[in-house]
Amino acid sequence: MDLAQLTHDLAALAHDASAAVAEASDLAALDAVELDVLGKKGRLTAILRGIGSLPSDDRPNVGAVANTVRSGIEAAIAERRAGLAGTELVARLAAEAVDPTTPGRPFRHGSHHPSLESMAEIVRIFDRFGFVVLESPEVEDDRTNFQLLNIPPDHPARDLWDTLYVDLPNRLLRTHTSPGQIHAMRTFRPPIRVLLPGRCFRYEAIDASHASEFFQVEGLMVDEGTTMAHLRGLLDAFAHAMFGPAKRTRFRPGYYPFTEPSVAFDVECLICGGSGCPACGRSGWMTILGAGMVHPVVLRNGGLDPERYQGFAFGMGTDRIALLRHGITDLRVFLEDDLRFLEQF
Ligand code: DAH
């Protein structure tokens, strides 16, 4: 190794390095160039290893040249690095840019099923009159669903409730929420004001107004001196809160084995306002619930003395009430789980 060769190698390295620095297209590539040229095991170090074999007079000269080459390369790298960092920052900012004028993404949300929504509204109204909600089983026995409600086996009134039986001895799916009256009377002492909302089941041929699964809300009030006038007043207040304060109402005679007397409670047709339309069978009235004074036999079956206590009860289908409130004509849409329908509520 002689002075001329070393000087030549250093010049060649300076040339190569400046080309490589210029070509580095990002910071990672530039780091690689720096390591290759200036690193501990880099090309400059390799060249300088030759200095030791030079005559001692030549060494300072080469050292000076080497330092100039090193600082030249360092400066070129520093300059390129600053340039690339600026370019990368600009590119990153552009990629991360937020457009504040973009419309927000819609947030998916659910809604209450119209039948349950009506049920909640009914519960809310009766809550103002001190009625508390009680849950009652969906699987009952014949005794509680029928017999204790004054419907003995073979009683013709059983035809009103086509029953679904469960594959267990003496078990059936409740056909109405009325058996909850028995549970309520056996659980609480009067004064009793309970609301019993829940799912009911009947063996029905399904059509626009019949389903085999539906919801009812039962009400029961028992106290000393409870009369039919209390029932009438309460149901009027309910109808006015639910359907509008100006709506006319009426009691019609009805028949249920568990109440005596029994009534059907009608509200002026919500569609035609009483003038008569197909929705109300041209009568101008819509029946929204059955009600009556609790039969003495039922009070006794609930463990209460009918000489001391009187009560009234009522039961309504919340699906039917939801139909009326929303002007829907076919009950089947409630059970089809069709989002196009459900999302409208
Ligand atoms: N349980 C009756 C039905 O499903 C509705 C009913 C009528 C409930 C009169 C009552 C009542 O509490 O007093 O058809």
Image (cartoon, grey):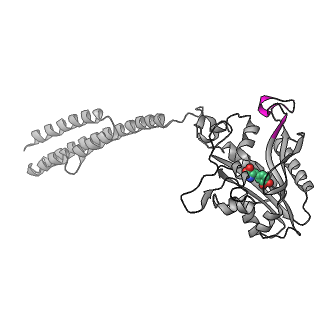
Looking at the image, residue 227 lies above or below residue 97: below
User: Residue 317: x, y in percent?
Assistant: 73, 47
Which quadrant of the structure image shows residue 212? top right
Give the camera-side residue of 181 and 54: 181
Give the camera-side residue of 243 and 235: 235
| Image quadrant where one finds the C terminus | top right
Looking at the image, residue 28 lies above or below residue 310: above
Give the camera-side residue of 247 and 89: 247
Relative side of 341 to 58, left or right: right
Q: Which residues are magenta?
A: 271-286
User: Residue 94: x, y in percent?
Assistant: 47, 33
Residue at x 62%, y 39% (from the top left corner):
206
| Image quadrant where one finds the N terminus | top left
| Viewer can see residue 120 | no
Residue at x 80%, y 49% (from the top left corner):
290
Residue at x 82%, y 56% (from the top left corner):
259
Which quadrant of the structure image shows residue 76? top left
User: Residue 95: x, y in percent?
Assistant: 46, 35
| Viewer can see residue 202 | yes
Count the marks: 0
Looking at the image, residue 257 lies above or below residue 37: below
Q: Was residue 221 drawn as part of the magenta stretch in this picture?
A: no
**For the stretch drawn in magenta, what is the main secondary structure?**
loop
